[in-house]
Amino acid sequence: MHTPGCTIKSDSLAVGYAHHTIVGGLNMHVMTGDLVALIGTNGSGKSTLLKTLAGLLPALSGSVSVLASEPGSAPKRVAYLPQHPVSSHTLPLRARDVVAMGRYAHLGLFRRESATDRELVSDAITRAGAEGFADQPLRQLSGGQQQRTHLAQVLSRQAEVLLLDEPTAGLDLTGKRAVADIIAAERARGVTVVVATHDLQDAETATAVMLLAQRVVAFGPPAQALSDDNIRECFGFTQPH
Amino acid sequence: MPMLSANPLLDPFTANEFMQHALFASVLVALVCAVAGTYVVLRGLSFVGDALAHGVVPGIAAALIFGVSGVLGAAVSAAVMMTGVSLITRKSRLSSDTAIGLFFVGMLALGVIITSRSTTFIGDITRILFGELLGVTTADLLWQFAALVVVACVAYVAHRPFVLMSIDDGLARTSGFSVPFFHSLMLILVAITVIASFQSVGTLLVLGMLIAPAAAGALLARRVSTMMLIAAAYGSAASYLGLLASYHYDLAAGGSIVFIAVLLFGITAVVSSIVARRKEYEIPHQHEHRH
């Protein structure tokens, strides 16, 4: 049953690909406005968990709900930023067009873009710091500029839950600070944020941190979860030496 | 001795009804291919498009033998082809290009076998593979126009999921669109396009009209709608120039059109890469001036 104020809930959830479990035994209880940081190395299960919450992968076992319904069933209310969003060289799209796609979940097939939609798109472009190249073709943008474009797309959806897979990838220090500010501003308007990151600094402002190493190493408030032992265990498992 | 044309660029069309029909038919092909081809190029479906184009051969061949409409035969064949490909891709451990490749060459072979039972084998197979642009009837034109309207309307309605899928299937899914449904719909549009075009340019050459103008559009355009318009303009220009070359130099009409379409793409690719390189060179210099 959905608990009021609870945005993401899972019980003994196992996530993975086609019967191959990557992380099991996930018990989450994420409240509205929380920031959950998923920490771990590549292959630790961060992205798999985010894809499951976005409805792109089915839960292998256990139960999971996002906004009291099955993951993926409320596209207007949940926005997902994939890791390394694809940017094909052939796509004739300007950065602004890519940001406007964030509104498609609301517009469906038939609704025309309103002035409000266009305003939300412009606003998202400004907030993500993409106004300088908004009218450039996507294929001419640098990696960091493309990342800002995709981030603006996620913001333009005005979702209640943001699932961000390494949103600071490819960004410089200013960009990383901008992402932190965006996350803080979204939380201030009651948005729940789950963010996968390598960066321990990102995790310090979170409500809860989940350390993953193909299993849950620790899950709790940063001060508790980010102990030296936990961090060594989380980042040590794939070390070759 | 034939009279010298007063206007060699227009007279072939004003003086001959079959040339007018051929021009209308090939421009309709160019338009329907511009719409479907844009999504084929954006989503990287060229190989599936090729497979569908060849997969319709046995249906057309059987229709010719039994004396029913070639369009009906092609439609049945395309349906078998699409179901077969999606079944094999889902159930088999082979990669989808192997599955599609085997299926389409099998269908093509079946087409040749069926046609070999016909007394006019060479004529029939040539007509299927290369089209019969100079024998297009008014009824054919009407059917092509209807196909264009259907393809354009469906593309207009499904434009958002189609563009999302061009970036990433996951993006379409998380925006609330069913990827399997819209992928199938896109394949159906390609099938309708192939069926509407094979009488003019043939099943072997239709792929050129589907891809070359759209690929040129992708190189030049900054927006998907512009890409489609450029593709339509390129395809129509290739139709006109191809027919003109075919008339004056007695060349195969379908082949000339598709060859010119591919040639135009080649020229565009070379010119646009030179321009892009020059821009890359200019940008650092502009910065230097500013500082």
Image (cartoon, coloured by chain):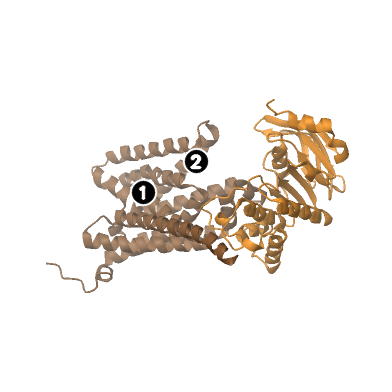
Chain colours: A orange, B brown
Residue at figure coordinates x 26%, y 42% from the top left: B118
The residue wearing badge 2 is B83
Q: Is residue A216 left or right of residue B141?
A: right
Residue at figure coordinates x 25%, y 43% from the top left: B121
Q: Secondary structure at mark 2?
A: helix
Residue at figure coordinates x 45%, y 53% from the top left: B192
- Please report, as a chain letter, where disc 1 is located: B
First in sequence: mark 2 vs mark 1: 2
Q: What amino acid is labelled 2 in the image?
A: Thr
- Residue B149 appears at what percent x and percent y? 47, 62
Q: What amino acid is labelled 1 in the image?
A: Thr
Q: Is residue B32 left or right of residue B24?
A: right
Q: Which disc number belongs to residue A236?
A: none
The residue wearing badge 1 is B203
- Residue B13 appears at what percent x and percent y? 28, 68
Q: Is residue B276 left or right of residue A179?
A: left
> Which quadrant is the C terminus of chain A positioned in?
top right
Distance between mark 2 and mark 1 Cα atoms: 19 Å
Give the total of numbered labels: 2
Front disc: 2 or 1: 1
